[in-house]
Amino acid sequence: MDIEKIAGRNVGMRYGGMGDSALLIHCALAHSGAFSPLMACLSAQLSMTAFDLPGHGQTQFDPASDIQDQALEIAVALLERQTRASHLVGHSFGATVALRLAVEHPDLVASVCLYEPVYFSMLHGVNRAAYDQETQDSQGFTRAAMRKDWPEAAREFLQRWSVEGFDQLPAAQQGYILKTIPLIIASNQSVVLPEKGGQLFERLAKIKVPVGLMAGESSPVVVHDILDAIGSQIPQAKRFVVAGAGHMGVITHPLDVAEIIREITKTNP
């Protein structure tokens, strides 16, 4: 684990593997160490860089700036270090950052592998019923967050998106989640409110590199709806369902996810 000054802020970094360069962007409430099992599976194929999202792990967060914008700045700075375009791997909120990178900085991107990008905002204009249903399904979390009852917000959030419930986690992990759970609200402008997501959706057809869209077999229906919307704009995208996995399949099923990444990046096992 290293801490480096990137895009004007201290950023927690992890590196591993050999081969073509790849940038890995983790989910909310985690840190770059969540990719350790996946990085071990891909260490012979890819030279991987993973960073802590703003406000996560060892990375600074500026509350005056959009969290997705801050993550994008870090990612662009890391990609610009490379002599050639890099593969992108993103999970959940990290996958929304990866998708923006592919649209806004195509010269830096060789391929895109997205595991359940939580771009709810993209549903607003193409599947309003799914968007409204997600608003309804997330009300328990939203109400708890609005009154700053972070333990209850964590319970509501993890009940839908995690393998374990909040109360079953070790005390140290509970403490970390209580520290980072307010950042879920900070991401609303980018991934929930329709304006920014809708603008990006209209530009998805500009992506010309290989794209892999992954979801867990037992994940919430809304993530499949989101992948339907994204895939409708990217003809070359390939869809994958990871058997037996949920939203945290990148962590729980790293062998299966690594096999998909190899297919998209055209690396050998």
Image (cartoon, rainbow, N blue to C red):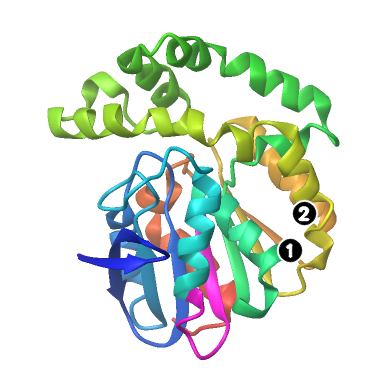
Q: Amino acid at mark 1?
A: Ala
Of 266 and 36, the residue lying toward us: 36
Q: Amino acid at mark 2?
A: Gly
| Local secondary structure at mark 2 | helix
Q: Where is residue 139? Give x, y as percent.
A: 56, 13
Residue 235 seen in this snapshot:
no
Image quadrant in which the N terminus is located: bottom left
The residue sitting at 32% across, 80% down in the picture is: 17
Q: Say if mark 2 contacts mark 1, CB within 8 Å.
A: yes
Give the residue furthest to the left.
171
Q: Where is residue 204? Give x, y as percent.
A: 78, 58
Image quadrant in which the C terminus is located: bottom left
Q: Where is residue 200? Give x, y as percent.
A: 75, 51
Of 100 and 213, the residue lying toward us: 100
The residue sitting at 42% across, 8% down in the picture is: 147
Left or right, residue 1 beside residue 269? left
Residue 103's disc is none
Q: Which residues are magenta?
A: 79-90
Of 59 and 128, the residue lying toward us: 59
Location of mark 1 (residue): 237
Left or right, residue 142 beside residue 179? right
Location of mark 2 (residue): 231
Q: Where is residue 129? Give x, y as percent.
A: 80, 22
| Local secondary structure at mark 1 | loop
Q: Please tell me whether residue 130 belongs to the stretch shown in magenta.
A: no
Where, by quadrant of the figure, is residue 226 drawn?
top right
